[in-house]
Amino acid sequence: MSFLSRYDKDTQDIIRSKHAAPPIQRLKPVEKRTVLEALLIKISVITGWVVPQNPYKDILLNTFEEVIAKEYPHLNHKEMEAAFMKYGTRTPDYGKEMNLSLFTAVLDKYRGERREAERNAGLEAENALKIDPLTDEQMINKARGEIQFYYNERKKGNQRPIIYSYW
């Protein structure tokens, strides 16, 4: 049973995408530019939105890079691609031309879903079994009990190794 199997399929997909690549904010500028340029092409293929020709393509890419850096620095390119696979074809596009409002509409929907998945995973972690730390006296008493147990076993002739769990 894997860690992800306890979640629904959408949450599993979000968690997989989240850990598939480093966030955009951790990429070097050259890597970020390359990744975002490739992402624009993938978005075009997924949604059918038309990539403008130069110089508008450069302007779109520059502003797209700025918006991603300001609004979505914690997302990675795999998550963005998954967001466009899921929501890009359902977003009203009025003319099939790429623009920033289309990008933000899709990424905002995904960001809300990601936040909900993280919240659910966080609640599950909070509700996990919590072990109270032992006080000094409890640790000493536990060690004494283990020593006594191993001493009695040796007295009976059982050759068990002495292992102290508190070390």
Image (cartoon, rainbow, N blue to C red):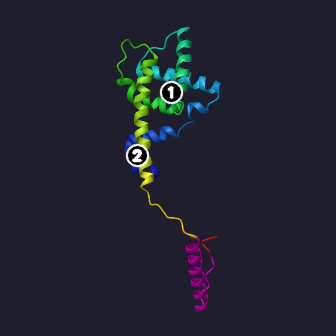
| Residue at point 42%, 32% (across, down) | 110
Q: Residues within 10 Å of mark 1 (few under 14, many from 20)?
A: few
| Residue at point 41%, 21% (across, down) | 47
x, y percent for residue 11: 41, 42
Q: Which residues fall within the magenta stretch? A: 136-163
Question: Compared with residue 70, is residue 144 higher up or lower down, i.e. above or below?
Answer: below
CB under 8 Å between discs 2 and 1? no
Question: Compared with residue 20, is residue 96 higher up or lower down, i.e. above or below?
Answer: above
Q: Of 33 and 62, which appears nearest the observer? A: 62
Q: Earlier in the sequence, mark 2 or mark 1?
A: 1
Classify residue 12 as left or right of residue 32.
left
Task: Give the residue at mark 2.
Answer: 120
Q: Which label is found at residue 79?
A: none
x, y percent for residue 96: 40, 14
Task: Give the residue at mark 1.
Answer: 71
Three-letter amino acid code at the position of disc 1: Glu
